[in-house]
Amino acid sequence: MGIFSKPIKSLDDLFMHTLQDMYYAENQIAKNLPTMVQKANDPQLKQGFQTHLTETQNQIKRLDQVFQVLGERPKGVTCQAMDGILAEAKEVMSDVADTDVADAAMLSSAQAVEHYEITRYGTLIALARQLGKTQCVGPLEQNLEEEKATDKKLTALAESRINRKAA
């Protein structure tokens, strides 16, 4: 069984595990974003984190819809990757004294989160299509598009002001 909650014996099992992984990950992100909102010094970064918190809460609702379509109860399984990304973000935030560098560090950590989410939603969409779970694709694609948009906004913010101020 290894690190997985139940043996993965089929593509359907893999889809369900990945869905549960993302459910856990999104809930962990929702728990951690308020701290980033509070610690961000740059007003645009603070607003970006606040906006993404609202988006994350909506993404969780869409995952709830996917579970409902599948006739399953929404449930997460520990996502060691997300736990690691968030633990590293907390560590970096606690180590940086300069507020401008701290903003750059938080933005960098937020992008690591976004990139993980982008890969996992892409995987879920591909698996759903392969398995004929067409009703799951729409909500997953909406989450993916929001993650991509957030990543682009963070990149623009980093390049236009946050990293410059930190330099």
Image: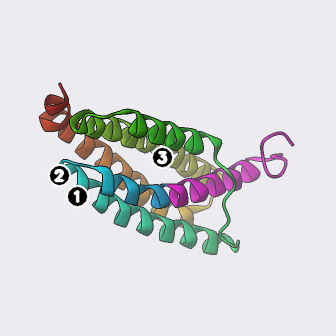
Q: Name the residue that disc number 3 marks.
A: 117
Q: Name the residue that disc number 1 marks.
A: 47
* Outermost residue to the front: 97
Q: Amino acid at mark 3?
A: Glu
* Residue 27 is inside the magenta segment: yes
* Quadrant for the N terminus in the image: top right
Task: Identify the disc placed on residue 94.
Answer: none
**Horizontal side, residue 137 vs residue 164: left or right:** right
* Residue 59 is inside the magenta segment: no
Marked residue nearer the N-terminal end (1 or 3): 1
Across and down, in percent, residue 146 comes to 35, 55
Across and down, in percent, residue 122 comes to 50, 45
Q: Amino acid at mark 2?
A: Gln
Graded by Cα atoms within 10 Å as few (under 14), some (14 to 19) or many (20 or more), the crowding at tag 2 reads few
Residues in magenta, as a range: 1-28
User: Are discs 3 and 2 less than 8 Å apart at CB?
Assistant: no
The quadrant in which residue 108 appears is top left
Tell me the element at label 3: helix
**Horizontal side, residue 68 vs residue 139: left or right:** right
* Outermost residue to the top: 167
Name the magenta segment's main secondary structure: helix
**Rounded to the nearest whole Å, what is the CA distance between mark 1 and mark 3?**
20 Å
Residue at 64% across, 50% down: 18
Graded by Cα atoms within 10 Å as few (under 14), some (14 to 19) or many (20 or more), the crowding at tag 1 reads few
Tell me the element at label 2: helix
Q: Name the residue that disc number 2 marks.
A: 44
**Horizontal side, residue 145 vs residue 159: left or right:** right
Q: Nearer the viewer, residue 27 or 43?
A: 43
The quadrant in which residue 95 appears is top left
